[in-house]
Image: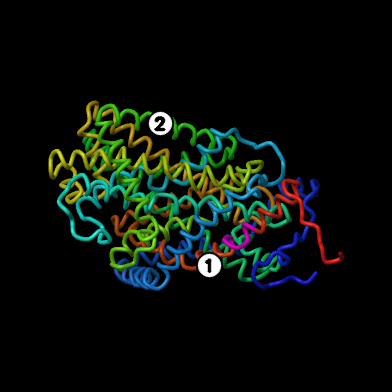
Amino acid sequence: MKTRTRGPRAHDLEPLISENNPNRAVAERSRSVLDRKVTFISLGILAVFVLATLVFPNQSADAINDGFAFSAKWVGLYWQGLLLATFLCSIALALTPYAKARLGGPMKPEYGRFKWVAMIMCTLLAGGGVFWAAAEPISHYISPPPYYGEPSGDPTKAANIALGQSFVHWGFLAWAILGSLGAIVMTHAVSKGMPLRPRTLLYPVMGRKVLTSWIGTVADVVSIIAVIAGTVGPIGFLGLQVSYGISRLFGIPNNYGTQLVIIAVLTGVAAFSVSSGLSKGIQIMSRLNVWLALGLMGAVLVLGSAGYIFKSYIGGFAVYMQNFIPTSLYHGDQGWAAGWTVFFFAWFLGYAPLMAIFVATISRGRSVRELILFTAVLPPIVTCFWFTVLGGTGIMFEQQNPGSISGPLASDGLPAVVMTIAEQLPFSGIIAMGFLLLTVMFVATTADSMSYSIAQSCSVSGEPSTKLRAAWAVTMGVAAAVLISIGDGGISALQSFIVITAVPVGFIMLPAIFAAPVFVRRMALEQGIISAKPDKSHH
């Protein structure tokens, strides 16, 4: 059969390998074969980046900033449109009868719903779940987003706008690109004999040719580099944030030595977790994260002001919904959009291919409707509430005592916000320690799940080895430790680099918008959920 390379029409997406081949599936899972080319190119690019940042910090920063500005200017609006289209397509797909189809076939899900949702929530939210939930709303409150015009002077309206803008960045669009259409395409393609690798997202366009094409190698490498940048950044920021918090609580010096110990502990936890596999370490860590987050959320609601939080959540969500499409696509103030909306969307987009691998791996047996509901709908609603509990409480304290939150933010930067909020609550020491522990666990969960996905992306076939999974966790920890040795400028450079790596990833994720509906309909036909229309051409 000749491989087609046109766009993803229905007849171009015919299955290339029989789905019902259990012997092949067992053999594939039992044999792990390393793709040395993808592995060493990815490691080489990471090493060059770290060395260049250390040896030529100013020149590297200038080059990265130029690349950031160029990417944000010329590709930023495309990313915003891609995320919006992905969300709208996901919702439309969930409303069709086809969405009853089960990923991977009519089998029993491997994980119970709570375990499954916990792994999804903690992996997708972890990168900034505590850090940005505290820092972003107060930032928008102090310096209102330009989309909403001149500040009215009404503190309630300003708080709702600040929260609504935060929801734009961490709401429906972010979750949809990370967990919906890409996972659907990945799952269906794997059932047809394709590997669990980023290149498989191009299967709708290139067919099996992507397995041996240089384009497949590039897709794997850029996806790995994007997720390394997106994960090493939070690891580095974690070192800065927890070091700051420990210094405030116990008087331990906030220096590189303290940050190094924190990163070493985090890396050790992530390496141990990913070594024990999905069903043990990653799943257990995720459940602990959820329970600790719920406990802290309840504590802040009780010790702060539950009434203020619920009013702010409703008000902020109303602002978000009223301005949903224009704020998602806002590009009026290009500098502001690049620093906020484009940056976050590029960050999440960079995660998307490897998140598709991770979500596809843990979602076998779940229906398409269930997948979309528990990635693109319910988790964003919960995330927005989490942002209101933490960030809204910070805004409340700032309104009651101007400068109480904005002062530490201005003098000590973003890492200071969580601790400053916690310090103004009763039982501040316990609450602060809880947030520091949650931050460590959240980022460790991201690091272990992404280490698993990176190792999977470096494997031609089979389950990635324990050593390879642990090695990637350690590699990201070492990179973060080295980069923060030159101050937070190294981590900031890496954060800006995320936007550059998202440029090719944006095109890797594009076929999913067109292919996912075709694949879901095919799954529904194969599983007998819908019946094919009779061919009337012979009548």
Q: Is residue 84 visible?
A: yes
Q: Position of residue 202 (x, y in %)?
A: 62, 64
Q: Quadrant of residue 331?
A: bottom left
Mark 2 crowd level (few <14, some 14–19, many ≥20, 10 Å Cα): some
SS at mark 1 in the image: helix
Would you place residue 525 above or below residue 279 in this image?
below
> Which disc number belongs to residue 292?
2
Q: Is residue 342 magenta?
A: no
Depth check, front residue: 70 or 14: 14
Q: Which residues are magenta?
A: 512-517
- Where residue 323 appears, as percent x and y from the top left, is 35, 55
In the image, 128 versus 477, the foreground residue is: 128
Q: Measured from the top left, where is residue 197 in percent x and y? A: 62, 57
Circles 2 and 1, Cβ within 8 Å, touching? The answer is no
Q: Which residue is mark 1?
A: 507
Q: Is residue 55 left or right of residue 282?
A: left
Q: In 3D space, how far apart are the residues under numbered discs 2 and 1 (Cα atoms)?
A: 37 Å
Q: Amino acid at mark 2?
A: Leu
**Outermost residue toward the right?**
538
**Which quarter shows the C terminus?**
bottom right
- Which element type, helix, strand or loop, lies under badge 2? helix
Tell me which amino acid carries mark 1: Phe
Give the side of residue 358 with respect to residue 531, left or right.
left
- Identify whether 155 is placed above or below 335: above
Q: Residue 10 appears in which quarter of the rendering?
A: bottom right
Q: Earlier in the sequence, mark 2 or mark 1?
A: 2
Residue at position x 22%, y 42% from top?
Answer: 395
Residue at 65% across, 44% down: 100
* Residue 53 horizontal/vertical position (percent): 36, 64
| Residue at x 45% of width, y 54% of height | 173
